[in-house]
Image: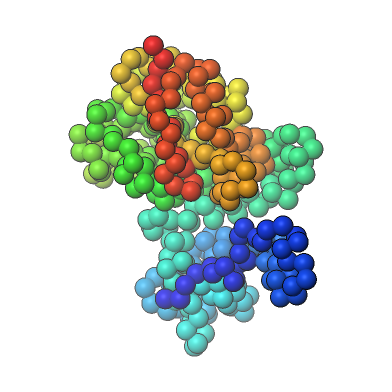
Amino acid sequence: MIPALTAQQTGSWPLTGPVDSVQGSTSQTTALVESMARLINSHRITGVLCAAARLGLADLIGNTAMPVAELASATGCQPTALYRVLRALASLGVFEETGDGAFRNTDASLLLRRDAEPSLYGLACMTSRMHLYAWPELLHSLQTGKPAFNKVFGSGIFDYMADHPEASEAFDRAMAGYTEVVADAIVDAYDFSPFAQVIDIGGGAGALLKKVLTRYPNVRGAIYDLEHVVTRSLESIKDTVWEGRLSGIPGNFLESAPPGGDLYVIKIVLCDWQDDDVKRILSNVRNVMSKGQRLLIVDAILPAGNTPSFAKLSDINMMVITGGKERTEEDFRQLLAATGFDVVSVNPIHEWVGLIDAVPCD
């Protein structure tokens, strides 16, 4: 299988240093112009990837090459148009053209399958259904300080998803996909064995708890989330190895938190909210905790200065979509101190997330 999404194809990132480092060099200037042009036009890559995911092309192709005509018939697409999209994706290493009007999967395209682990199918569908509509209104967020999503869709993202099940399912799948990418790093870096009951605040589909329960057979877990999320999550674990060990607690973390956890986990949740709401969430958790219990925050940690970071663009996504933000280590320390926690450790384990371990103040 051919490699996917090389630097030459997508543009190197970060780009070159100060302007004077390329002045006087035609080849370097040309390379910089080409890289910038690729970045500016990167919405084209997003568009074809999202279309491929929503059509389920990787699932249809499976383990053998499939003619475009058959793919078009199965997806209700015009054959020539679909060929053009697949040709473009193949040039990026996502699918591979076999030379006889057919395409097969590559390692990259397999990530778009619904049953892949990790799977980026949900991320692509969520991006296609919501983010691609909101991001063109970034200026609205810059000028008003409010989420562009609300302007485009007429409500906040969580209210919108409550009324649009397909968008909500895509969001849950996207969050599960993110978790699958980092879950092994989390369970490798953190010892869950001392805790009999782990409660995941805003736990969604339970992707992290499934990893924890698989690694630690004596641990039980509970998803704490909105009722429709918990209902869908519990439905998905029926007749699985987790049934009986993984439960659900419906509720709203902005209003309360459930008692009874030895460890409370808040994973990729706080980034969705502004500081006042984060303090409410943390205070609600603190109110049900006592000495000996712990809090584990799993979230992006912004590095200082010009250090390249996935989180710095994720931070803009939070501005546009939810009105939240990514935070520095110091930001987290201040929020935790203000809500009655002492920080035990901070451990950046992955480009996407770090672990912040905290205990209730004495």
* Horizontal side, residue 1 vs residue 302: left or right: left
Q: How many marks?
A: 0
Q: Is residue 347 visible?
A: yes
Vertical order, 182 against 86 (above or below)? above
Q: Position of residue 37 (x, y in %)?
A: 72, 66
Instruction: Indicate the quadrant containing the C terminus: top left, top right, bottom left or bottom right.
Output: top left
Q: Nearer the viewer, residue 246 or 320?
A: 320
Q: Is residue 47 visible?
A: no
Vertical order, 101 against 75 (above or below)? below
Q: Position of residue 268 (x, y in %)?
A: 49, 38
Q: Residue furthest bottom?
A: 100
Give the colour scheme shown: rainbow
* Horizontal side, residue 134 vs residue 166: left or right: right
Instruction: Indicate the quadrant containing the N terminus: top left, top right, bottom left or bottom right.
Output: bottom left
Q: Position of residue 297 (x, y in %)?
A: 44, 32
> What residue is shown at x 52% (from left), y 61% (from top)?
53
> What residue is shown at x 74% (from left), y 46% (from top)?
137
Q: Residue furthest left?
A: 218
> What residue is shown at x 65% (from left), y 35% (from top)?
323
* Horizontal side, residue 182 vs residue 275: left or right: left
Q: Nearer the viewer, residue 170 or 88?
A: 88
> What residue is shown at x 70% (from left), y 67% (from top)?
32
Vertical order, 304 against 336 (above or below)? below
Q: Position of residue 350 (x, y in %)?
A: 44, 47
Q: Quadrant of residue 41?
A: bottom right
Q: Nearer the viewer, residue 138 or 76?
A: 138
